[in-house]
Image: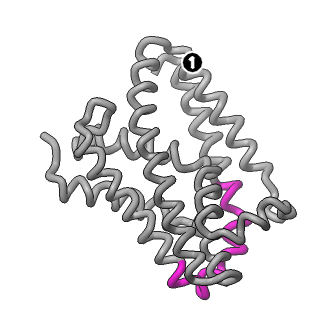
Amino acid sequence: MQPSPFILFLLGMAASFSGTMPFGPLNLRVVDTVLNRSLRAALYFAIAASMVEVLQSFIAIRFNAFLEFHLQKSPWVRTVIAVLLIIIGFFFVMIKSDRPKSTTAEKLRNNGFLYGMTTALWNPQAIPFWIFVVAYYRTSQWCNLNHQAPWMFLITFLSGVASGKFLGLLTYVRLSKLVVDHAAVASRWMNKLIGFILITVGVIQGIRHAFGC
């Protein structure tokens, strides 16, 4: 049984909001935008990032069904996924937080909407996060999100996703002065934390595949 449109909207908004609140590339950059640019530029940033989040969550819904099908038909896919997770994890661990900013990045910062869109597109955490959310909602029987769901069903959920993302980033905009005092320490360890999590998940997937779990 599928939830009502209101509950479905709340499920999308709750997941998106909770995924936005931990320190990450997007919320740290929206803080930077409001402090070094303007409130208006930060709002455009948040709107653009929310639009991209809708696209990423939609891709995750489609990819989740694709992944589930191929895991059943081709067990070797688990090995490929495990290796990719470990490689991406090591990439995050090796990232240095004090990399110099490129000229292109500086130009993008002059356009809040374009800066928000490109930053969100280059956020590798989003699609894996939504794959997990879709799988969790399905297994917990909150809702069954898949490529066969009616369009109004998907639109309602994705509207909640956009709203949750915007509200999450807006919270950082409102608390930017407080956040900036702690952002430096948090951002220094965020990439390493993400990397270790991905490596751990990759190793677990490899062990499960090796022992047929």
Point out residue 18 in the picture as x, y percentages from the top left corner.
42, 62
Identify the residue at image location x=66%, y=83%. Answer: 35
Point out residue 41 in the picture as x, y percentages from the top left corner.
60, 76
Q: Is residue 27 magenta?
A: no
Q: Quadrant of the C terminus?
A: top left
In this picture, residue 176 sits left or right of residue 12? right
Point out residue 53 in the picture as x, y percentages from the top left corner.
48, 53
What's the colour scheme? Answer: one colour
162 up-or-down from 146: above or below: below
Q: Pick the residue in front: 120 or 111.
A: 111
The reply to whether residue 48 is visible in this rendering is: yes
Q: Pick the residue in front: 54 or 183.
A: 54
> What span is colored magenta in the figure?
173-193
Identify the residue at image location x=78%, y=53%. Answer: 95
Q: Determine which residue is flagged by label 1.
A: 210
Point out residue 40 in the picture as x, y percentages from the top left corner.
56, 80
Give the structural element (helix, strand or loop) at label 1: helix
174 up-or-down from 5: above or below: below
* Dominant secondary structure, magenta: helix
